[in-house]
Amino acid sequence: MLVPEFRREMKNYITNIFAIHDYVARWQASRFRLSMSRLNKGQHVWIFDYIEDFSCFSKIELQQDYFNKRQIGIFIVLVIRHRRPEESLETTVSEVRVIQYDGNVGSGY
């Protein structure tokens, strides 16, 4: 790839794709801060995130392992609320579920 072509592609990426991503990230952060500042007792803020095709990796891997990775989907739910007076300051995980896919297409989870 020639340098001028590379520069055009990078300019297109920065002005279009990254600019949109940056705008959305800033908007989401401002809405989160606003929601947290207005959180009353008895109310909750729910945050959902889904990571699709997360590649598992090891510290030491062979070159052939680069293309042959297991991938998983991670679904995260975070609930933020005010602490009740009788609760401790420790953070606890209330429930963790692991669902395993056996690799057969159409078999379900």
Image (cartoon, rainbow, N blue to C red):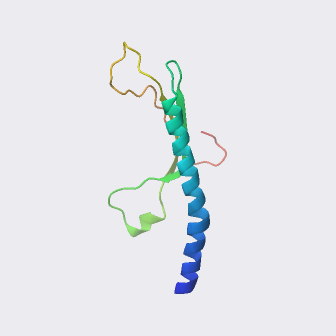
Q: In this view, does 85 lie to the left or right of 50?
A: left
| Foreground residue among 34 and 49 | 34
Q: Where is residue 59 in the image (x, y as percent from the top left)?
A: 33, 57
Residue in the picture at 54% in, 79% down: 7
Looking at the image, can residue 1 be seen?
A: no
Confirm whether residue 79 shows in the render: yes
Q: How many labels does the image show?
A: 0
| Position of residue 66 in the picture relative to residue 27 (left or right) | left
Q: Quadrant of the N terminus?
A: bottom right
Which residue sits at x=46%, y=27%?
A: 95
- Residue 44: percent from left, percent from top: 53, 25
* Depicted 106 relative to depicted 92: above or below: below
* Residue name at image x 49 percent, y 38 percent: 33
Position of 50 relative to 34 (above/below): below
Residue that extends furthest to the top in the rendered view of this protein? 86
Relative side of 6 to 63, left or right: right
**Quarter of the image containing the C terminus?**
top right
Q: Observer-nearest residue: 107 or 28?
A: 28
Q: Residue 37, position in %: x, y?
A: 49, 31
Q: Which of 72 and 19 is in front in this view?
A: 19
At 55% from the left edge and 40% from the top edge, which residue is drawn? Answer: 31
Tell me residue 39's x, y (percent): 51, 26
Q: In this view, does 46 lie above or below 13?
A: above
